[in-house]
Image (cartoon, rainbow, N blue to C red):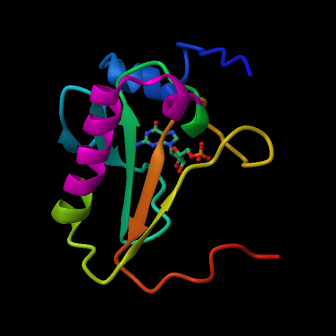
Amino acid sequence: MEFAYDDQNIFAKILRGEIPNKTVFENAHALAFEDIEPQAPVHVLVIPKGSYVSLDHFARDASPEEQAGFMQAVAEVCRITQVDDGFRAISNARTHGVQDVPHFHMHIIGGTQLGRMLQK
Ligand code: 5GP
């Protein structure tokens, strides 16, 4: 599988500071910010700072330090947003996954009772 990264995607622009964001947490390898169109009271996007298209790209090619930094950001987002009663982590990939922004991101969604994972 070849992963072609387009550095003109909206999250690349956020990482370069060309577009503002509401930052929830940041470390050396990841940035977490509020989704512009929240689907629940908590809806935060966690993205790596590296150029990865999707979860499978990140899991295959990111260094252990990048992967650890990303997971630390996920943990911090859960702590900061106080989703103690639970949350959902979603990462859409490519066409079947209906991914809109081609920079790997994890949605952290919570703050309310969510419905079933998938609608048939
Ligand atoms: P996807 O469909 O790729 O999994 O999710 C992309 C997400 O990015 C959507 O939930 C959408 O609301 C969010 N999004 C798109 N453009 C922007 C933006 O400019 N700023 C922020 N904060 N979120 C965005």
The percent coordinates of residue 5 (x first, y second) are 59, 16
Residue 28, compared with residue 84, is above or below; it is above
Q: Nearer the viewer, residue 93 or 41?
A: 93
The percent coordinates of residue 20 (x first, y second) are 31, 31
Image point 35% across, 34% down: which residue? 67
Q: Is residue 23 visible?
A: no
How many numbered discs? 0
Q: Nearer the viewer, residue 53 or 39?
A: 53
- Locate the C terminus by quadrant: bottom right
Image point 37% across, 23% down: which residue? 63
Residue 80, compared with residue 23, is above or below; it is below
The percent coordinates of residue 48 (x first, y second) are 38, 31
In reply to whether residue 65 is colored magenta, the answer given is yes
The percent coordinates of residue 78 (x first, y second) are 26, 63
Image point 51% across, 81% down: which residue? 114
In reply to whether residue 114 is colored magenta, the answer given is no
Image point 48% across, 55% down: which residue? 37
Answer left or right for 118 relative to 19: right
Answer left or right for 22 relative to 90: left
Give the magenta-colored segment's residue range: 57-76
Q: Is residue 40 visible?
A: yes
Residue 114, compared with residue 77, is above or below; it is below
The chief SS type of the magenta part is helix
Residue 48, compared with residue 44, is above or below; it is above
- Locate the N terminus by quadrant: top right
Q: Nearer the viewer, residue 86 or 110?
A: 86
Snapshot quadrant of residue 80? bottom left
